[in-house]
Image (spheres, rainbow, N blue to C red):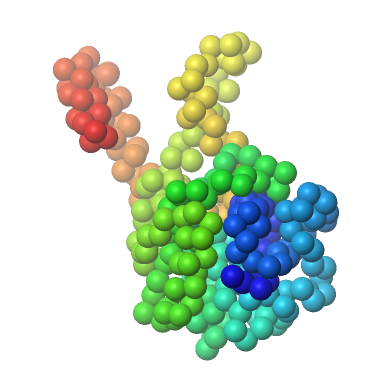
């Protein structure tokens, strides 16, 4: 058990972590900070957290575990604040969807004390945002990727693994670069495709009637286009190279499909569909 867990950024993910910690008695006290005061007062009123911090960060100074749950481009400022106020023995992790830039940022700011930080990425989330949408079972049986480098401290790593397991996660480990390559293919590009598809459909001259004719397939696909725009802007900026590479592969496949249809080559098109389906079996 952690005496004090501190969540920096109390949105849907941060709130879900707080609820999970309380539900499983993993931390004696749960404190939080967020620039949105309404989120903090809501969370305290609804017993999601025990108390919230102000810009003096008096509560942060007491934390044994800090989980950063904020947009990636804010990490530099957050890490600088944490470095000033944290206890020497405090362990820090995060929930960011890219890892190479995060690890580099942590190393630059924490320097010789970089052993205090272990990067994490729980593969759990919803298209809704805000602490009011926090979910008590969000992490149950979800995979959390923990990224390791040659300088990762084993004791800190084990503590972070234990933390995620206690709130219900399964653990996988990757290097930061491999994490970012895989996520560009399995998460980042699919989100961009969803945004693009929704945008293209709503540019249609039939847009006034389109909502009447969208079935479950479209709704499932379009759901993730409701995700936090700021978060996805930061992801694209921080994983730019890998996302562009993955987009090139996807566009190549899309062009092949277009060519087969344009050439009335339905035999090859059927074969493509069959082979793709079998890959998912």
Q: Quadrant of the C terminus?
A: top left
Q: In the figure, is residue 191 to the left or right of 279? A: right
Task: Give the camera-side residue of 249 and 66.
Answer: 66
Residue 240: give x, y in percent of width and height.
46, 55
Residue 125 visible to an observer of this rendering = yes
Residue at the limit of the structure toward the bottom, as seen here: 112
Task: Please report the residue visible at 68 percent of the width from the left and 59 percent of the height from the top.
Answer: 9
Task: Give the camera-side residue of 192 and 66.
Answer: 66
Q: In the figure, is residue 213 to the left or right of 185? A: right
Vertical relation: 140 (above or below) 68: above
Task: Give the camera-side residue of 77 and 196.
Answer: 77
Marks counted in the figure total 0
Task: Please report the residue visible at 57 percent of the width from the left and 76 percent of the height from the top.
Answer: 91
Task: Give the camera-side residue of 103 and 138.
Answer: 138
Q: Quadrant of the N terminus?
A: bottom right
Q: In the figure, is residue 173 to the left or right of 78? A: left
């Amino acid at each position: 058990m952690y005496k004090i867990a501190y969540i920096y950024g109390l949105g849907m993910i941060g709130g879900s972590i707080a609820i999970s910690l309380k539900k499983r008695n993993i931390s004696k006290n749960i404190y939080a900070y967020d620039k949105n005061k309404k989120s903090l007062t809501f969370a305290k009123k609804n017993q999601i957290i025990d108390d919230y911090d102000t810009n003096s960060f008096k509560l942060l100074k007491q934390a044994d575990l800090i989980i950063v749950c904020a947009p990636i481009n804010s990490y530099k400022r957050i890490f600088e604040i944490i470095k000033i106020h944290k206890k020497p023995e405090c362990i820090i992790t995060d929930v960011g969807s890219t890892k190479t830039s995060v690890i580099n940022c942590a190393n630059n700011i924490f320097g010789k004390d970089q052993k205090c930080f272990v990067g994490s990425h729980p593969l759990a989330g919803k298209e809704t945002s805000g602490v009011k949408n926090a979910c008590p079972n969000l992490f149950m049986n979800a995979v959390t990727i923990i990224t390791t480098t040659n300088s990762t401290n084993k004791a800190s790593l084990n503590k972070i693994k234990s933390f995620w397991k206690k709130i219900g996660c399964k653990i996988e480990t990757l290097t930061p670069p491999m994490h970012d390559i895989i996520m560009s293919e399995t998460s980042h590009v699919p989100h961009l495709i969803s945004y693009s598809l929704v945008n293209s459909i709503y540019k249609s001259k039939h847009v006034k009637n389109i909502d009447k004719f969208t079935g479950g397939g479209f709704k499932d696909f379009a759901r993730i286009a409701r995700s936090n725009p700021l978060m996805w802007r930061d992801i694209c900026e921080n994983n730019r190279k890998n996302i562009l590479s993955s987009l090139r592969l996807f566009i190549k496949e899309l062009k092949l499909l277009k060519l087969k249809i344009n050439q009335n080559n339905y035999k090859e098109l059927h074969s493509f569909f069959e082979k793709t389906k079998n890959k998912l079996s």
